[in-house]
Image (cartoon, helix red, strand yellow):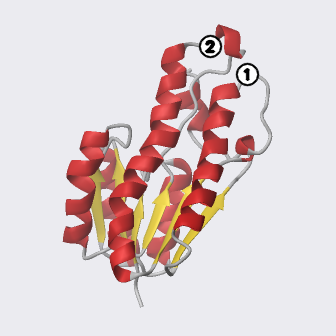
């Protein structure tokens, strides 16, 4: 039976691959990202290639107002949610902590930690009502072992793991599953974002 899957940050990299894997499996996919044009391209391709329902949601996970105003309505229109994949995330800069900018740090915290928190808080009530669901949070090996010049990024990915562990404990009385995936280096456009396009 087809599931309804919501993937954030689904226009490129790991998020795009995740959305495609679910579509290939026959699941319906709600994909979100900040770029409407790219979302439309992904929607058209996945719908055509796999014959599943693919809906798009232009969303900036960093904006609590954006998430709270758009996500519940999108889930209602989609017919509910079975799986949430919190994939949206980024790194900014690769400088020693003392030389890094506060702006880069805030962008990473807003996206990787607060964005995951906002989206999960918006989705979880739907899963609790059904007493089932699966939350998949994309972490990183950087959340286990810090590396030089990545202090804040590593801290955000450590937060992803700890948040996942805490949510799993807090929802233990339900049939909701919480999984953290912590990949290492993957070939994606990640570094183009990290180095501001350079």
**Which residue does the numbered mark 1 point to in the structure image?**
149
Identify the disc placed on residue 100: 2
Task: Name which residue lies at 56% across and 53% down.
Answer: 14
For the point 33% across and 77% down, which residue is it? 129
Separation of marks 2 and 1 at Cα, in angstroms = 8 Å
Q: Quadrant of residue 124?
A: bottom left
The extreme bottom residue here reads: 1
Residue 122 image offset from top left, x and y in percent: 33, 57
Q: Answer above or below: position of 192 versus 37.
A: above
Q: Can you name the residue that lies furthest to the top here? A: 99
The residue nearer to you, when weighing 175 against 115, is 175
Q: Disc 2, disc 1: CB below 8 Å?
A: yes
Q: Does residue 71 appear to the left or right of 108 in the view shown?
A: left
In the image, 67 versus 165, the foreground residue is 165
Depth order, front residue of 50/164: 164
Vertical comparison of 7 with 152: above or below: below
């Amino acid at each position: 039976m087809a599931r309804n899957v919501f993937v954030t940050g689904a226009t490129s990299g790991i998020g795009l691959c995740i959305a495609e894997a679910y579509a290939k499996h026959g699941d319906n996919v709600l994909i979100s990202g900040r770029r409407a044009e790219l979302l439309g391209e992904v929607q058209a391709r996945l719908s055509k290639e796999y014959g599943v329902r693919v809906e798009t949601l232009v969303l900036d996970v960093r904006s609590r107002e954006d998430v709270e105003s758009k996500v519940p309505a999108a889930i209602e229109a989609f017919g509910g949610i079975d799986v949430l994949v919190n994939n949206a995330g980024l790194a900014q800069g690769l400088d020693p902590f003392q030389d890094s900018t506060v702006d880069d740090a805030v962008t990473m915290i807003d996206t990787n930690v607060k964005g995951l928190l906002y989206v999960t808080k918006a989705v979880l009530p739907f899963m609790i009502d059904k007493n089932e669901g699966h939350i998949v949070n994309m972490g990183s090996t950087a959340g286990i072992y810090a590396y030089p010049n990545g202090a804040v990024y590593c801290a955000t990915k450590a937060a992803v793991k700890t948040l996942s562990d805490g949510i799993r404990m807090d929802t233990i009385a339900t049939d909701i599953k919480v999984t953290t995936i912590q990949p290492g280096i993957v070939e994606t456009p990640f570094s183009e974002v990290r180095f501001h396009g350079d």
